């Protein structure tokens, strides 16, 4: 999971850089329209790939969190139920923030 967290941070940084690059290409008056279109197509393709990777990493994190909650719930402990409910609410908030 820590590796996924690091990868997720790197992927988000790359997305921000690429989105900035899109703005730079669009705003560059010295480039012909055809060149801009080709560059933008390439950048957008990279953005789509990175967004897919971010989605995959986030989904893996959510699956792991749900697995941890299930294991906690399996203990049958009354205090575990409180922790599971809290963890579930945290997960719902995380999903709602997307």
Image (spheres, rainbow, N blue to C red):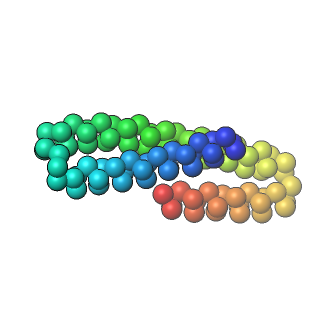
The spot of residue 18 in percent (x, y) is 38, 47
Along the line of sight, which residue is nearer the eye, 81 or 5? 5
Along the line of sight, which residue is nearer the eye, 92 or 32? 32
Q: For the N terminus, which image quadrant?
A: top right
Residue 59 visible, this angle: no
Q: In this view, does 27 lie to the left or right of 86?
A: left
The spot of residue 61 in percent (x, y) is 62, 45
Q: In this view, does 60 lie to the left or right of 81?
A: left
Identify the residue at horizontal 77%, vertical 44% (top origin): 71
Identify the residue at horizontal 77%, vertical 63% (top origin): 82
Along the line of sight, which residue is nearer the eye, 79 or 6? 6
Q: Name the quadrant containing residue 80.
A: bottom right
The spot of residue 26 in percent (x, y) is 22, 52
Q: Is residue 52 left or right of residue 42?
A: right
Residue 13 visible, this angle: yes
Identify the residue at horizontal 29%, vertical 54% (top origin): 23
For the view shown, which residue lies furthest in the front direction? 30
Q: Is residue 64 left or right of residue 72?
A: left
Identify the residue at horizontal 63%, vertical 47% (top origin): 5
Q: How many labels does the image show?
A: 0
The spot of residue 70 in percent (x, y) is 73, 46
């Amino acid at each position: 999971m820590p590796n996924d967290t690091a990868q997720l941070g790197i992927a988000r940084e790359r997305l921000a850089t690429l989105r900035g690059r899109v703005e730079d290409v669009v705003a560059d008056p010295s480039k012909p329209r055809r060149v801009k279109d080709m560059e933008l197509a390439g950048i957008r393709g990279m953005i789509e790939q990175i967004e897919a990777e971010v989605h995959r990493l986030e989904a893996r994190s959510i699956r792991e969190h749900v697995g941890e909650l299930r294991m906690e719930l399996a203990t049958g402990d009354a205090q575990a139920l409180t922790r599971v409910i809290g963890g579930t609410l945290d997960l719902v908030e995380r999903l709602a923030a997307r």
